[in-house]
Each structure stands twice: as C-alpha cells, then as structure tokens.
C-alpha cells in the first residue's frame, strides 16, 4: 500500500488517556489516518522519521481569542506551532453576526482588546456567513459555539435589564440557528457586556435549546458581580435546572472552591473546567470598574467615565483589583506603556496606580489590554497551579490573545509548557494524562467529531514532538517566542508545521457537531 504521508518509528500516545504509549508507524491517506502498526514495508509519497518522538492527536484549544488571528495578522501560526489543530470560536460569548452595521461596529470595538490591531470587512448576517471565512483560509480547524454577546445585543441592545419574553424568544431563535449550523456549545462571558445583563431565566431558556441539540453550556462565570463561589453555584444551578453539561472557563483550584469541587464529585454534577496554568490573566481595564459603570455601548460608557463622581468611585474599585500594580500593559492604541508595569508607569506620571489605570482607559478607550498577575504570593500561586494541573475535571486551554505588541505568553506557549514543565520537569502528569487533557478530553466534552484520538479512520490531525526537548519559550518579558521541540503538525492530512516552521498552507475546516 502507498500512503500520502507515513510517519515512521514514533511512539504513539492515542489521546484516550487509557493506553500507554506504543511503538507504531502512522499511515495517512487524504485527510484520514488509514493505518497504525508496523508499516515498514509500505511506500509513501512523503515520510517523517519520528524516531525518539511522540506522535499524538492534534491538540484542541477550547478557549482562545484566535479566530480573527487565524485569518489575518502576524501570528496566524502561533497556535499550530504548539500543536493546536482545532480551536473553538466565540470565547466569552464574543461574536459579531446577525447585527445591524452600527451594533456590529460597537461590539467589534468593545471586543478589540481580544482582537488586536487587525481590520477585516464586517457584516456577517448568519452563522454560515461567518463560518464561510475559515475553510482553506486557516491553518487550524474551527468549531462553532453560540456567541451569547452577539445574540443578546441583537435582541436587547446594550440595555442593563432582564430580557422580555419576546426578546428571549428572539435569542432562542438565534441560538437555534447556531446549533443548526453545528455549534457544540452555548458560550457566554458573564462579566462582559452585554452578556453580563442576562438573568437566570434567560440563561435557562437558552440552555434548554443547547441541551435539546446535545450541546453544553460554557461560560466565563459571573465573578465580578456575585463573587466566585456564587458564580460556580449559579453554573451548578443551571445544570440542574436544564439537565445540561456545564463548563467553566479559565479556572483554577484553591481553598475557595475546593469544597464546591468535592460537592460536585459527591453529587455527580456534570461539570468541567479549563485552565492555562499561568499565575496571571489578561483582559481590559474596563472589567475592573464597578459593573454599573460598564453597562451601555462603548460611547455611552466612555462619556460616563468623564464624570468626576464616577471617576472617584471607580478609582477606589480599581485599587482593590490592582493591588500592588504589577500588571503589564499589553497593548495601547498609542503604543505608550506597552510591556511596562502599571506601578512603574504610575510612578513616572507621579500619580496613584488606580488613577493612572483610569486615565489609561480614558485615553486609550477600548484599544488596550493588560496582563493581570494573581495578587497572591509565589508559594500560594505555585500550590494553586499544582492543584489545578492534576484535577481530573480540568482540561487545557490557552485563552490566548494575538496581534497585539505584548500579549500574554500563554497564547504562544501554553500547550508546550504542559509537556515540558508539568510532564517532564515536575512529573505532575504522565505524558498520557497531559495529552488526554489537550486532545481526547476536550473532543469528548465538546462533542467534536473525529478528533482527539489517534486511530485508524479518525481525522489526520497529528502532532510530532520530542518529549526530551519540548518546551515553551514565551515569557512575560518575551511573550511571542515560539516553542521548541514540536517538529511536525498535520491538519486534515496536510503539513502545517514541518521541522518546526510553518509551511504556509491553510487546510483548516469548520468542524460541526453531529
């Protein structure tokens, strides 16, 4: 038999988390894995010698702000360079379909901190209008989710109030359109506008639609208005009320939620979460303002922030969130302060950290993003990361942001760091466990067809890496450096990374829940 591509002499870790790695060749025909085993007598049009390397399923990033970056910009290959072959759309409920031109531009502006400095033509009216951008124009596959921010904006505008029955009916129809288009989840950002304005009744109605299609509920939970424990409890309550599996974005395990996780185990609640396992997050400074000042369109919010009384109350709130001020400016429209800490910038400006942050919002508006280190000591951060890495309900996701001057290093190193730091160096996870958390687990949880397992008949999305050298090279100081040790990445049977370098091909497709 002659294969299109034959990967020889590698150790296969199949992504199930059950079987230990085994020696096998992998034969690929077209976009499918045709055979595994001793294929030494077979011919191939192209071959990779994977001696001493791991061959495994392509990794799946269930929460990453990469979809626009996949289409344009300087970091189109940042995720595939670390072995990610499928990326989910609509993280935090962000999306831009089904809106008037004015509303589309407003939401695009509001989400600019996660998109970066790119401009593409807007105006996608249906899910298919948007999804049509990706086939053969992306290095990775994409998998749709329902973008709650967009569907709520279409029905209710920016209003900070519960939806009416008619508006909920409109959101139900829009959710159904996305589920009919193959979405695997309803995704929300309950600390972001306008998603934050949804009440429990609205969430129940939309969850029932997603559940009807066998989808799940995935959300940035409502931390800032009700607190972390209450946000977890709301998520659990939704699962009980609608019988839907639930998933919480970018979470961690510490004393605050340890009892809840024990309760979840005890009561067999169908809940998972993901983590990027860095002790720092990234978002815009608007999120640190009192929620009542965040509501409304971008223009409405920015006009409100000029009020001296709003400024005084907001600065007091910012100080609580910013603490020691070691946050790093990742991006500003003006370029001022990029890569520098807020405390240093404030000192240069002879003002307080919170006042400097407030003035940064006024000056840069939505065109800024900031890295937020956890406001805990190094020992507590290490304990938390360790507990999180080993938790059986946790899968990996980068929450990466691209096309900005100084992004969080997680977008360029998260998955490679798991293999290098947590498997090889700290031995917190076995290789099989880590690969499962990055492939089989997310594929199963989000019902992604034919992915997450390396087996005959499955899609030919594969990663080849050296377990002795794989490592993240991105740091908080130099965040865009690509990883090392990942030699080959194959998407739908085509090589997108060869010998560690992008090939320039775009074989990605839209995957749809069956």
Image (tube, grey):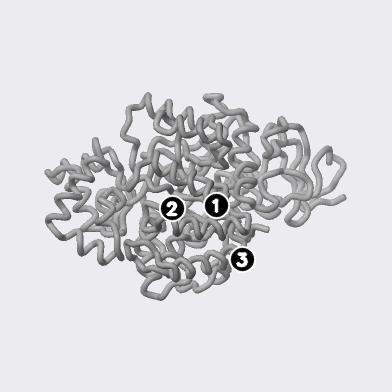
Query: Which quadrant of the figure has residue 420?
Result: top right
Where does label 3 land, which residue? 180
Point 46% across, 60% down: residue: 148
At 37% from the left and 24% from the top, the residue drawn is 379
Name, please, the residue furthest toward the bottom.
101
**Circle 2 residues within 10 Å: few <14, some 14–19, many ≥20:** many
CA gap between label 3 and label 1 equals 19 Å
Q: Residue 242 carries which label?
A: 1
Front-most of residues 203 and 189: 203
Q: How far apart are marks 1 and 2 (CA)?
A: 35 Å
Image-based side of 15 in relation to 346, left or right: right
Q: Residues within 10 Å of mark 3 (few under 14, many from 20)?
A: some
Task: Kindly state the secondary structure of the residue where label 3 is placed.
Answer: helix
Q: Quadrant of residue 7?
A: top right
In the displayed structure image, the side of residue 181 where residue 31 appears, left or right:
right
Examine the rendered structure and indicate whether residue 102 appears above or below residue 306.
below
In the depicted structure, whether residue 119 falls above or below residue 228: below
Q: Against 45, is 22 above or below?
A: above
Q: The residue tagged with tag 2: helix, strand or loop?
A: loop
The residue that disc 2 covers is: 402
Residue contact at pointers 1 and 2, CB within 8 angstroms: no
> Can you give x and y, in whole percent of width and height, for residue 96 in the image?
45, 66
First of labels 1, 2 by sequence position: 1
Q: Which residue is drawn at 34% across and 65% down?
A: 158
């Amino acid at each position: 038999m002659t294969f299109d591509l034959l990967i020889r002499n590698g150790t296969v870790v199949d992504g199930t988390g059950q079987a230990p790695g085994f020696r096998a060749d992998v034969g690929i025909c077209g976009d499918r894995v045709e055979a595994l085993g001793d294929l030494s007598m077979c011919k191939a049009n192209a071959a990779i010698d994977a001696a001493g390397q791991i061959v495994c399923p392509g990794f799946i990033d269930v929460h990453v702000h990469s979809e626009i970056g996949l289409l344009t910009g300087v970091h189109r290959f940042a995720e595939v360079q670390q072995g990610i072959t499928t990326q989910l759309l609509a993280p935090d409920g962000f999306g831009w379909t089904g809106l008037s031109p004015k509303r589309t531009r407003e939401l695009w502006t509001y989400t600019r901190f996660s998109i970066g400095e790119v401009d593409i033509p807007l105006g996608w009216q249906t899910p298919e209008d948007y999804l049509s951008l990706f086939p053969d124009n992306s290095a990775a596959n994409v998998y749709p989710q329902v973008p709650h921010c967009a569907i709520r904006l279409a029905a209710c505008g920016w209003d900070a109030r519960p939806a009416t029955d008619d508006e909920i009916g409109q959101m139900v129809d829009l959710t159904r359109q996305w589920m009919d288009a193959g979405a695997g989840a309803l995704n929300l950002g309950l600390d972001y506008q306008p998603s934050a304005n949804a009440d429990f009744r609205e969430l129940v109605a939309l969850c029932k639609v997603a559940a009807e299609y066998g989808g799940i509920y995935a959300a940035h939970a409502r931390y800032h208005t009700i607190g972390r424990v209450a946000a977890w409890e709301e998520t659990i309550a939704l699962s009980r009320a609608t019988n839907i599996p639930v998933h919480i974005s970018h979470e961690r395990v510490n004393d605050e939620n340890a009892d809840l996780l024990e309760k979840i185990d005890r009561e067999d609640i169908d809940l998972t979460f993901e983590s990027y396992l860095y002790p720092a997050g990234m978002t815009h400074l608007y999120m640190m303002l009192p929620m009542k000042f965040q509501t409304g369109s971008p223009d409405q919010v920015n006009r409100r922030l000029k009020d001296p009384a709003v400024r005084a109350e907001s600065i007091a709130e910012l100080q609580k969130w910013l603490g020691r001020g070691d946050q790093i400016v990742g991006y500003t429209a003006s370029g001022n302060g990029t890569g520098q800490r807020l405390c240093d910038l404030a000192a240069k400006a002879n003002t307080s950290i919170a006042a400097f942050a407030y003035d940064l919002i006024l000056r840069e508006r939505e065109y800024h993003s900031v890295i937020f280190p956890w406001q805990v000591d190094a020992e507590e951060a290490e304990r938390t990361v360790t507990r999180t890495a080993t938790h059986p309900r946790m899968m990996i996701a980068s929450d990466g942001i691209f096309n900005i001057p100084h992004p969080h290093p997680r977008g360029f190193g998260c998955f490679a760091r798991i293999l290098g730091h947590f498997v090889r160096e700290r031995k917190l996870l076995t290789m099989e466990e880590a690969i499962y958390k990055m492939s089989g687990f997310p594929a199963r949880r989000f019902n992604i067809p034919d992915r997450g397992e390396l087996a005959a008949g499955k899609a030919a999305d594969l990663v080849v890496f050296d377990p002795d050298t794989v490592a993240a090279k991105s740091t908080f100081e130099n965040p865009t450096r690509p990883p090392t040790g990942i030699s080959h990445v194959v998407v739908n049977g085509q090589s997108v990374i060869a010998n560690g370098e992008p090939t320039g091909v775009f074989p990605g497709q839209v995957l749809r829940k069956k």
